[in-house]
Image (spheres, rainbow, N blue to C red):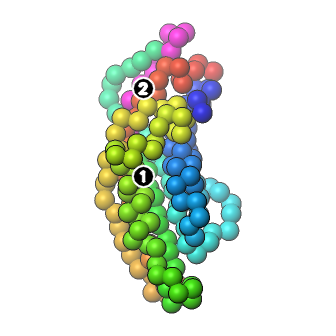
Amino acid sequence: MSAPTASQSENIGDNIAAGFVTVLTQDTAGTTLAAFGPRMPLQMPKNRIEVQSGGFIRANDLMNFTSTGTAYYNYRRGTLSVTVITQRHSQINTGVTSQHGSMVGRVRYLLSRGAQKMTANIIGGYGMLDIIDQGDNYRADEATETDRTELRFQIDLVIPPANYLDS
């Protein structure tokens, strides 16, 4: 999906989050976890993955030009935050052990260079330059008996001239 206007090209955070939700949805079909992007007004299941992206700034002073000669900064850097939230076994009473660790590992793999899942047709036509794992933060909430791990990634990308239109 190529971004048809400059304003959509500059909506990098939402495009990256939506792209990773697509990757998750294709990869985790049949699991008990659901993927939700930013600002989606849906009731949250107890087991879920939350995806947020933003903070995209120019990564350097290099500029590119559209076909009409409009100059723009084409290298961008921002963040992608993926939070895996799972209900503990004692609360779900299904006899199935928690999938928390395996889902954290799967998210990390899907964003690895080896997986190559974040392609231009998935992420709004951007060219993915690098995805850098910035670590994670685990916490257990005893009151709700949930495990929560937030994984953070630095995203470096380029906006090709064909996807940065003047209107």
Q: Decide which of 27, 112 is in the foreground and name it.
A: 27
Kindly tell me whether residue 58 is visible in this rendering: no
Q: Which residues are magenta?
A: 66-78
Q: Position of residue 36 (x, y in %)?
A: 59, 58
On screen, residue 66 above or below 160: above
Which residue is found at the position 58% from the left and 26% from the top? 6
Q: Which residue does the numbered mark 2 point to in the structure image?
A: 74
On screen, residue 147 above or below 132: below
Q: Quadrant of residue 39?
A: bottom right
Numbered badge on residue 122: none
Numbered badge on residue 110: 1
Which residue is found at the position 58% from the left and 29% from the top? 2
On screen, residue 146 above or below 37: below
Asked if residue 12 lies left or right of residue 112, the reply is right
Name the residue type under label 1.
Leu
Which residue is found at the position 32% from the left and 52% from the top? 133
Asked if residue 42 lies left or right of residue 62, the reply is right
Q: Decide which of 105, 81 is in the foreground and name it.
A: 105
On screen, residue 26 above or below 45: above
Asked if residue 34 lies left or right of residue 72, the reply is right
Q: Position of residue 127 (x, y in %)?
A: 43, 31
